[in-house]
Image: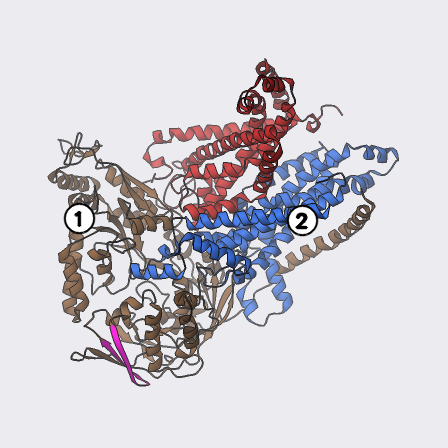
Amino acid sequence: MKPGVFLVKLLEIALIFFIILTLLFFLFRLSPGDPVSKMVDPMLTPEDMDHLISQMGLDRPVWEQYLIYVKNFFTGRFGVSFHYGEPVKDIIKQRLGWTILLFTTSTVMAAFAGVYLGKIAAWKKNSRLDNIMSISALVCYTLFIPWFALLLLWGLGYQLNLFPLGGVLTPELWVGAGSFVAKALDLAHHMVLPLMTLFIINLGSYLLLMRSSMLSVLQEDYIITARAKGLGETVIRDKHAAKNAALPVITSVGLNLAFSINGGALTEQIFTWPGIGRELIFAVSNNDYPLAQACFLLIALVVLVANLIVDLLYAWVDPRITY
Amino acid sequence: MRPGIRNMCNRFDRSYSYLSCILIPAVFVLVLAASCHKEKPSLYLKIGLPEAPQSLNLWLGTDANSKRILSQIYQPLYRRHPKTLKIIPWLAAADPVFDPEKSTYTVTLRQAKWSDGSDFTSEDVVFTRQLFFDFKIPGRYSKWKLIHKIDAPDPHTVVFHLKEPSAIFMSRIMTVPIVSKAEWQDVVKKALATEKPLRTLQDHVVTHPMGTGPFVLTQVKKGAYIHMKKNPYFFGTGLTLGGHVLGPYVDDILFRVYGTSDVAILALKKGDIDYYWWDIQAGHLEDLKGQDDIDLYFNKKSALYYLGFNLRKPPFHDRALRRAVATVVDKEFILTRVLQGYGTPMNSVVPSGNHFWYNPDVKTYSHGLPREDRIKAAVKILSTAGYTWQTPPVGEDGSVVEPSPIQLPSGRKMDKFVILTPPADYDPRRAFVGTMVQEWLRDLGMPAFARPMAFTALLDTVKGKHEFDAFILGYGKLNLDPDYLRAFFYSKNDRPRGWNMSGYSNPEFDAIADAQRRTIDPEERQQLIYKMQKIILADLPYLPLYNPNVIEATLNQRFKGWVSKVNGIGNIWSMCTVKPVD
Amino acid sequence: MLKTHYIHRFFAGWQIFIKNPVAKAGVFIMVVFMVMALASFCLPLLGPMYDPMTGIDPDIRLSTPPSLTHWLGTDNVGRDILAQLLEGAKVAFIVGLSSAFISIVLGTAIGMVAGYAGGLWDAVLMRAADIIMVMPSLVILLILASLFGQFNIWLIVFIIAILRWPAVSRVIRSQTLSLKQRPFIEASQVAGASSFRIIFRHIMPNVLPLAFLYMTFRVTSAILVEAALSFLGFGDPSQVSWGMMLQWVWKSGHMFQAPYWLIPPGISISLLTLAFYMLGRAMDEVLDPRLRRQAQG
């Protein structure tokens, strides 16, 4: 890809991001509820409430607030959470790690497994194995995530008592002088259920994608050539077809992000996994503007950047594509 | 494909197969191992919370869960006795000495230390008052304004000068936590220099709050737990206060957050926590009743759940209509069906558990009459007031029938009106009671519609904009001092965001409300408060609906000694007297 | 002339469609749910006890397992779960179909304009489509939930539609592009017809069938997103939807005690979306012969 085109794409992202930033700001400021309304202490007089509102800067004219906001944003000051009173940056830093851990592990596992199983399914097209795998994948793809997560919680967590019912660690182990291995195992133990949920949900889409990608690759000439050359079936399948078929799947991780992120937020909420998704939901229920905005912008940025990377990868890998 | 890519893919292929050979078994082993590991037994007192505390900064953390943590740390001069509910000295050494001529209260402080070992002195009290004034702390400043001067003649004496006698001096002003000058003075100085001092103060990140309470904060792991340890300098250790010999007798407390109550109850049953600091819904009781290792506690609440009317416009500007509503609403039903019997009937705007201030002698409207009798009584009130129907709810022969739409005295049909309630996920009881009220009113031919509305939007509509007909809201933890009656019904408080949401305006009431504030003699004040309740229940700007009991559960295997009091066992007395079972 | 051609093609397509076992399964499931949705209109006939929102059983005050009077049991305030399930079916269809319809209308309009106008319009519109398509809709709805405070069911429908038109517009755009070259369009242009007229009188009738085919995928995402939103507590509190039911069972702390309450709504959501998805895939195979399962090798 020409460097000029790359620059244009970067600028485009910046512009889109800025538009989203502005849109969000105005939408929030025009909203009806405000955080002070949630304070139900009967002894707070309207004066107290006005005082709090002015301290939060919500009584300034909207244009002023906007300019302040934009200036702060580009100087790295993302505001202070109304609810926690801490800088938004700190809160996000604390939560981001957990989300990345869960998210990347599940995505990588699902992608690997999806590619592996999809390749087999396409190879054995229309066989019973293929049918079972395709239908299962379809079911996984359309599963309602909260329900599935609750079922896992109920079945494996409650009935069979195999896994903890949420949270990210067992306090006693971490407060005392627990060993590193014990702590790591405890974390893994808590991670199994949310990981399983995300893994199964995402597996479906990767499998189906790999399967259809593989099917179209199998029609290509060079596969027929390979067969004619007398190469073994597994070799053709894995070294020739799968490798080419896997590329659109890997790049589709970017497109799939919207789906994965939705699922991630829901999973975090149900398993009380302290990540960005859960924090966003909390911030929205608490009318915590700065935090909700920051979480959302972070997610939007991740999505935009991921898709840019995917575009780049695709162009680099497949010379037929020009921009 | 480009050659570079092919190589990459080859390597990718190999590493893929290596990875899968390692990853999959590794994950397997990890999972197996993890599910086998046993928890080490520990003597931590483990408490579950329904939500993460908002903040450990006393000036920002106004939510219930922050208060739960902070109340172990910051202590007030006086607090209420757990049984008698009288105000007793806590950080103060004795009752204050009141000088009527000079209008002062002299308070002698106890010998106490802060958690870093330094002495608690009158300077801290003076500093706290100054903080309230400098920052106009919401909820504090409006009360402490009455103290126009404060003296600290020696390190253990404080003299409060009041402009005029105030009935709420002890109950609302002296029960406020005192903070340490040493901890806050630098922060305060910096904050006062900024443009938004209160906000700056609230944004100060507190990592090691200094307090005089039984516990200190050791560690906060965000999203996971909060660890507190016994405060070696707690002034109450060994003292007998409130009828209990205080400890604390536990060395460590671990607070954990559980998103939903069934996960928390499961944790309780499994022994992951010893106490879940939240109300348990009646639906879980069956599950818990049979368990030997679980103790259940039933306590009254100082709560008020009510139906509020908008007196500013039709149809509820008419008192007769409100009285008819009060007559037809079946409080018995709410008590038995919605609360499943775990509640107290609510006849006045002061809960009956608040025995000193509660007036048992107010007008009750339907005392558990069956449905037909209630409808008949309501119809009588309405007919006398001039309301009519084509087909009245009570027929010629005295039987109750389905009525046609009710007509106003002017002859016009009543316009449809909406009863706003919180959504079912926020509070299923209120939402459900809303639909029940809708049905009861429709029995009278009234075009009632119950509508759930998101809580913040609801508050904004009702309190902020006053754009409503009726609503069902509640106060889960009403202060035991009935001064809030003044807040709710004083005519001047009828303004946007004011606490007089119904728009009630009665000069007689206003006069008595002002008078009770200045009446120090409890017996005299009680009579005034009684009168206020009588007026409210006659005029009905709010119709009290129910007062749920608080049901809580603890694991009795490891700890015992929980103290029951109004609003439950989650209180400072429990924290100071709970001890390990040995 | 073109119309009969399309009808003929439709019937030919249907023959292929219905032979597909995936299609058969999808149609079957959908019919079951449609019956359920229609049945919800009959609920008032059964009496006030079966009202999904306000119906209470005089004898039951807690969540109870299935019984003769309540085939799926009751929720934690004594309401009938089956009644709620039926009502939820109605809501799911309404939300899914109306949201899909609006996004089809939007997507078709935008796709046609982009394809016909070309140039800058095309570039900007399609870029916007790309951006919107990759945004996680649930997250956007969450942000908007804090803006509007109270979501009305139609607002949810509308917002989902606005977020989901891009996929449709792409397809319509390419179809428009190919149509643009056709002689009859050129003739209209020469005759002096305005662009507006050409788009809506000539192009639209030819792209609409394609647009409707893509409706099925829009339906699935609309149902799932509304359910997720209601589950998190930001849905319309005056509507009983499946997502709302799951929210109640979760928040009231009954998810471990009441499998008869937990399982039906979730299965319904998954099955209905599965059905629509299967229908969509089967339709895809009708349009794209390469994907068809071959009878002989």
Per the image, the residue denoted by label 1 is B365
Q: Which chain is drawn using red?
A: C
Q: Which residues are magenta?
A: B147-161
Q: Residue A257 in the image: x percent, y percent?
A: 61, 46
* Viewer-closest of A155 and B73: B73
Q: Is residue B29 above or below residue C205?
A: below
* Disc sitting over residue A7 in the figure: 2
Q: Quadrant of residue C55?
A: top left
Foreground label between 2 and 1: 2
State the hue of chain B: brown
Looking at the colours in the rendered structure, which chain would you say is drawn in blue? A
Categorize mark 1 by other alpha carbons within 10 Å: few (<14), some (14-19), many (20+). Answer: many
Disc 2 secondary structure class? helix
Determine crowd level at label 2: few under 14, some 14-19, many 20+ residues with C-alpha closer than 10 A: few
Q: Residue at x 51, y 27 (%)?
A: C31
Residue nearest the observer in this picture, B395 or B454: B454
Mark 2–mark 1 contact, CB under 8 Å? no
Q: Amino acid at mark 1?
A: Tyr
* Coloring scheme used: by chain
At 25% from the left and 37% from the top, the residue drawn is B442
Report the residue that reaches farthest toward the right. Answer: A229
Relative placement, left or right, of B331 versus C149 is left
Tell which subunit mark 2 falls on: A
User: Does residue B86 appear in the picture of this structure?
Assistant: no
